[in-house]
Amino acid sequence: MTYEQLKTLKPSAFKRRCGVHPETFEQMVEGLRPDLDRAGKRGGQAKCGKKRKHTLKAQVVVDQSTGQIICTAFSKGRVHDFRVFKQYRSPMLPEQLCLAGTGYQGLAKLHPYSCTPTKKSAKSKLDKEERHYNQMLASLRIVAEHTNRRFKIWRILAERYPHLLASRSARRRRFGLRFNLIAAIVNIELARSS
């Protein structure tokens, strides 16, 4: 669907199709127009079935009650999640509760009020209480997963990042800027809907 066809949609249909309100979309297009004019034809699909090694990782801290994005951190994709957390030291008070995924095992040593899912060992399965604990933690962490869904609405974050191969260092630095702009738009949309 072209932009001209999108302009004719009702605001509710426009938001369902694009993920944002028409006014927010209009501001985004105006802000990104210089980048859209300079867009080249570099990149493309990989010719072989190998996975790409040049990936980028974004870490997001989300407020549990509102779903607002508090801060972000970025790294190369091959860096482990917990190492990114240790490297950037997200701003959290010692008495704040931190709900994290399985990639953050050992977080309790750095942050006293942290909860991570229990992993099963190679020899034994999880017992009923541990599975119940993991289910309860997952039901609390669903706010963060919904935030990830809001990010994946944006094509630049849902698919392979298109600017990895061309002039890597400058384009990779711009990934953080673009991610933060999308995070700001998501926060605006959350504030507008509540």
Image (cartoon, helix red, strand yellow):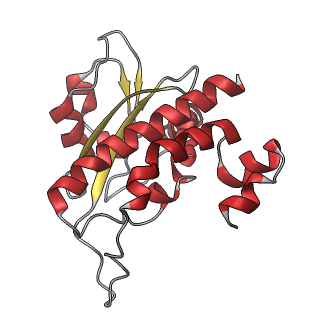
Quarter of the image with the C terminus in it = top right
Q: Position of residue 84 (x, y in %)?
A: 22, 40
Q: Which of the two residues, 129 or 110, is positioned nearer the viewer here? A: 110
Residue pictured at 27% horizontal, 62% vertical: 55
Horizontal side, residue 80 vs residue 161: left or right: left
Q: Is residue 88 left or right of residue 5?
A: left
Residue 168 lies in what quarter of the image?
A: bottom left
Furthest residue toward right: 10
Residue found at x 27% / y 73%: 52
Occupied quadrant, residue 2: bottom right
* Picture layout, residue 192 above or below residue 83: above
Image coords of residue 127 (percent x, y): 48, 45
Q: Residue 146: x and y, percent?
A: 58, 41
Q: How many marks?
A: 0
- In the image, 99 versus 174, the foreground residue is 174
Residue 97 shows in this picture:
yes
Q: Is residue 91 shown above or below 120? A: above
Q: Nearer the viewer, residue 173 or 31?
A: 31
The quadrant holding residue 46 is bottom left
Give the x, y percent position of residue 73. Answer: 28, 37
Visible residue check, residue 21: no
Residue at horizontal 42 percent and vertical 38 percent from the top? 181
Identify the residue shown where x is 61% and y is 42%.
26
In the picture, the quarter occupied by the N terminus is bottom right
Question: In this orientation, which residue lies closer to the viewer: 57 or 192?
Answer: 192
Outermost residue, bottom side: 48
Q: Is residue 146 left or right of residue 173?
A: right
Q: Is residue 22 above or below residue 2?
A: above
